[in-house]
Amino acid sequence: MPEAASAPTAPRATIGDSEFDRDTALTLREPGVYDIDLSAGWTIISAVNGGYLLAVLGRALGDALPHSDPFTISAHYLTASQPGPAVVRTDVVRTGRTLSTGQASLFQYDEQGREVERIRVLASYGDLDTLPDDVRTTARPPAFPPMEHCFGPEDGPAPVDGSSAIADRLMLKLDPSTLGWALGRPSGKGEMRAWFGLADGRDADPLSLLLAVDALPPTAFEIGISGWVPTVELTVHVRCRPAPGPLRVSITTRNLAGGFLEEDAEVWDSADRLVAQSRQLARARLS
Amino acid sequence: MPEAASAPTAPRATIGDSEFDRDTALTLREPGVYDIDLSAGWTIISAVNGGYLLAVLGRALGDALPHSDPFTISAHYLTASQPGPAVVRTDVVRTGRTLSTGQASLFQYDEQGREVERIRVLASYGDLDTLPDDVRTTARPPAFPPMEHCFGPEDGPAPVDGSSAIADRLMLKLDPSTLGWALGRPSGKGEMRAWFGLADGRDADPLSLLLAVDALPPTAFEIGISGWVPTVELTVHVRCRPAPGPLRVSITTRNLAGGFLEEDAEVWDSADRLVAQSRQLARARLS
C-alpha cells in the first residue's frame, strides 16, 4: 500500500499538496466559520478517525488565530462524526504576543438539517519557529526495531482491519512486540509502537502530528480487550516542528480501571526530537 | 502548621465543611452563572494557585451539569487571577446518560468593571460511584519515604516559600530526594514528590484532587530553573473517588525544550489506587 515506503523513487506528496492537506482543507463561509466535506478516506470501519477530525479543527484554528501552530489542543468528543458535510465554528478567546487561545466546534447535520455538535476543542497556539533551541529533555526515544522488521496491513495477517480506509492513507509499521493481539496472543502490556508516516510520502508537520497520536490500534488490544475504545477527551502538546522522515509513535496505557483507560502517546522525529506528547481518556468495555 | 498532621486529636474538618469548601463555594446569580470571592488563602506569593482556580470552575460545572464528578477537565489559563470578586459562567455542551460535557469560564473585572476572562475550561463529567470495580492497572505507586521522613514548610529551611498563604492550608510533606533545590543543590531530575492533604484535615474528594495536581513546587526547580513557571494548559483525569487519608502526589517532567515543559502528575490514595492523572504545559524561562 504505502508507495512512499515501498518505492522510494515514487513521487512524494508535499506539505500543502497531499491527501491529508486536501482532506483537511476548509472553505471559509464567513469570518471564523468554515465548511468542509469530511473524507471517507480516514475512517476505521465506519467511524471517522479522531485524529483526522482534530487536524481539521486544528487547521481551522490556525487560520482563525494570529498564531499558526497548535502548542496545546484539547478535544472533547461528543457524538460520532460521519463522512460528509460539516461546519467548523471558531471563537478567538484571547490573542497574546507569543500565545493565542481559541475554541472551535465541529458540527454536522441531522435529518432536519439542524446542526449537531460532534467535537469541541480548546487550544493555545504559538509559533514553533520562534522557540529557543535550548533543549534539556531527559526523555529518550523508545527502543524501536528497524522499520523493515515491523509490520503493516500489507504484510498480513492484517494487524489493522483491512476494511479501514485509513489504512490506505497511512504508512504504519507496527513493532512486532506490540502485535501479539493480531495473532490472538495479546502481551497483556498496554503498549503500542509504530513507525508512522503518510502513505503518499508527505512529511510531518504540526497538523499531521495531531493525526499521528491517534492513528495506532488501541493499546487495549494488547491488554486483551477487543472492540470499540471511543475517545472521550484527547489533549496534544506539539513541542517541536518535526524533521522530514518517518515518525516513531509510542503509546502506553498504565491505568485501565472502571471502564476507562488513558492512552499516553509520544511522537519522535527522525532527528530524535520529542515532537509531540498526548494523552487521551477513552472508554473500554471491560470483559 | 498542619494541625491535622501534627495533632491527630485535633478536630478534623470534613468534606463540605472545610476551608477548601468555604473558599470554593459559589453563589448562584442566575442559571449557570455563579459569583465567588476568590480567597487570598490559596495564593503563592501574589498569584492565585491554578489548582484552586480549577477546583472553583470544577465545582461550578458539577452544579451546572447533571453529573457531579469531573472525569476529564482541561483548563487554558489566559490571564493572572487575583484574590477578590469573580464570576463563573457555565455552558452545558451535551448531556448523556453516563457522561455530560460542559464549558466554564472564570472572569474578573477591570478598572471599568468590564469582565476579563481568566481561565476557560472544557470538561466531561460522570458519576465515579457507578463505575465497575474492575481494575487492571499496571501502574504501581511510586516509592515514597514515610511521611515522618518528609519535609514541610514548618520543618524549615522552608522548601515552600513561607510568604505563600497556600502553605498554611496544605499538609505538604516533600520527599527529601526531590528537595535538593531548596538546599541549592537541584538534582537535575524533573521530579517532585509529596504527601498531600488539607491542613484542616478534610479528606480528599474529586474536587480537591484538582488542587492536589498543581500544589507542589515546580519540577523546574529540581532542573535548576528558578522563578515563575506559569501554566498554559492543565488537564486532569479523575479516575477514582479517593479513600480517606493522605494522598501521594508524584510529578515528573521529561521534556524541557524551547521554553516549555510538561508536568505529569499522578495522585495515589491511601488504598493504593491511582485516583488522578494530570498533565500541564507550562512556560519556563531557560537560563
Image (cartoon, coloured by chain):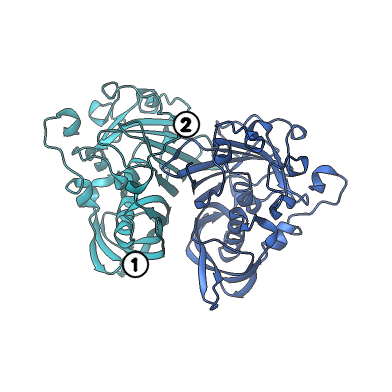
Chain colours: A blue, B cyan
Q: Nearer the viewer, mark 1 or mark 2?
A: 2
Label 1 amino acid?
A: Glu
Which circle's residue, 1 or 2, is located before the other in the chain?
Answer: 1
The residue tagged 2 is B138
B178 or A28: which is nearer to us?
A28
Residue A278 appearing in the image: yes
**A142 displayed left or right of B264:** right
Q: Residue A43: where, in percent of width, then height?
A: 65, 56
The residue tagged 1 is B115
- In the image, residue B84 above or below residue B213: below
Image quadrant in which the N terminus of chain B is located? top left
Q: Looking at the image, which residue is at 60% across and 48% down?
A: A214
Q: Residue B73: where, in percent of width, then height?
A: 41, 52
Q: Looking at the image, which residue is at 70% across and 38% down?
A: A270
Tags 1 and 2 on a common chain: yes
Q: Looking at the image, which residue is at 33% across and 41% down?
A: B212
